[in-house]
């Protein structure tokens, strides 16, 4: 990694973007699941809130940091060499920090009687640890596979909004996985409420499953499905490579 990166304001802007983006995703996503006893917090409500929020965040900060807002996405980018490992590690720290602040803000504005576990993710009691891990693996695979597909710069057949497609994939996964595992798809999103509510039941599932799912999705797309067209890729100025999630090929 170029030493000039530390002197470049774009680096700090990218880290701030990941921090703020994850903060908002956790605040809104977990907040949408709050049960007020009036039918709120339904699976459809949560799924739409997560998808719409993710799409909005990626649209807003994608040009700054790539809009990862998820350690499993960043790990996939690192493994496929789309982001420098050191910068990727800093991204993950920013994401976890943002998630923790977002969860803390949510706790501060909710009445104590409806806080619950602040949206902490726990597998359904009827699922084994391996089954829960498999659900998170597959759901995150779908999300990251979508990200790599719609952000492939060599494709000229993709129409419409890439952020919206990413949001739709997240909503679809939530519709299936919420009852099973809480549909985390994001280690930072699970870590923050776990810390604040001391809910650690099979917490490792929410790191292993999403990260492995993201890595497999990234590798399969990169080496099997990546577009082979001759569309030119913008020249990199240095090794930071954090512009627009997966929207560039090495």
Image (cartoon, grey):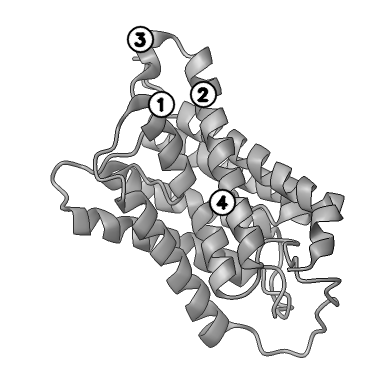
Look at 50% across and 28% down and name the residue there.
Answer: 103
Q: CA distance from mark 4 to mark 3?
A: 32 Å
- Tell me the crowding category of disc 4: few under 14, some 14 to 19, or many 20 or more residues within 10 angstroms, Cα based: many
* Badge 3: residue crowd in 10 Å (few <14, some 14–19, many ≥20): few
Labelled pair 1, 2 in contact (Cβ < 8 Å):
yes
Of the two numbered discs 4 and 3 on the same chain, state the one appearing first in sequence. Answer: 4
Give the SS element for disc 4: helix
Image height check: is 81 above or below 177? below
Residue at mark 1: 196
Residue toward you, 247 or 81: 81
Q: Earlier in the sequence, mark 1 or mark 3?
A: 3
Number of the label disc, if any, that sits on residue 92 = 4
Q: Which residue bears the numbered disc 3?
A: 113
Q: Nearer the viewer, mark 2 or mark 3?
A: 2
Up/down of 166 relative to 190, above or below = below
- Which mark is nearer the camera, 4 or 3? 4
Sequence-earlier tag: 4 or 1 = 4
For mark 1, does the 10 Å Cα neighbourhood hold few (<14), some (14 to 19), or many (20 or more) residues?
A: some
What is the quadrant of the N terminus in the image?
bottom right
Which mark identifies residue 48?
Answer: none
Helix, strand or loop at label 1? It is: helix
Q: Circle 2 sits on which residue?
A: 104
Q: From the viewer's perspective, is 226 left or right of 190?
A: right
Of the numbered discs 2 and 3, the one sitting upstream in the chain is 2
Q: Residue at x 43, y 73 (%)?
A: 216
């Amino acid at each position: 990694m170029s030493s000039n990166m530390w002197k470049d304001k774009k680096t700090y802007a990218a880290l701030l973007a990941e921090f703020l983006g994850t903060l908002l995703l956790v605040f809104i996503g977990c907040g949408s699941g709050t049960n007020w006893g009036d039918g709120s917090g339904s699976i459809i409500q949560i799924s739409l809130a997560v998808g719409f929020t993710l799409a909005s965040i990626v649209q807003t900060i994608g040009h700054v940091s790539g809009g990862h807002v998820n350690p499993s996405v960043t790990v996939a980018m690192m493994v496929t060499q789309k982001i420098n490992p050191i910068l990727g590690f800093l991204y993950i720290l920013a994401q976890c920090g943002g998630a923790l602040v977002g969860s803390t803000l949510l706790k501060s504005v909710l009445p104590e009687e409806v806080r619950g576990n602040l949206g902490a993710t726990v597998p359904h009691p009827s699922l084994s640890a391996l089954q829960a891990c498999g659900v998170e693996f597959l759901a995150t695979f779908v999300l990251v596979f979508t990200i790599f597909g719609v952000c492939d710069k060599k494709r000229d057949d993709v129409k419409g909004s890439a952020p919206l497609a990413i949001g739709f994939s997240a909503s679809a996964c939530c519709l299936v996985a919420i009852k099973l595992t809480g549909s985390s798809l994001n280690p930072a999103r699970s870590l923050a409420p776990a810390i604040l509510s001391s809910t650690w039941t099979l917490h490792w599932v929410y790191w292993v499953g999403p990260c492995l799912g993201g890595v497999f999705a990234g590798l399969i797309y990169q080496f099997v499905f990546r577009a082979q067209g001759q569309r030119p890729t913008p020249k990199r100025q240095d090794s930071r490579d954090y512009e627009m999630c997966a929207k560039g090929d090495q």
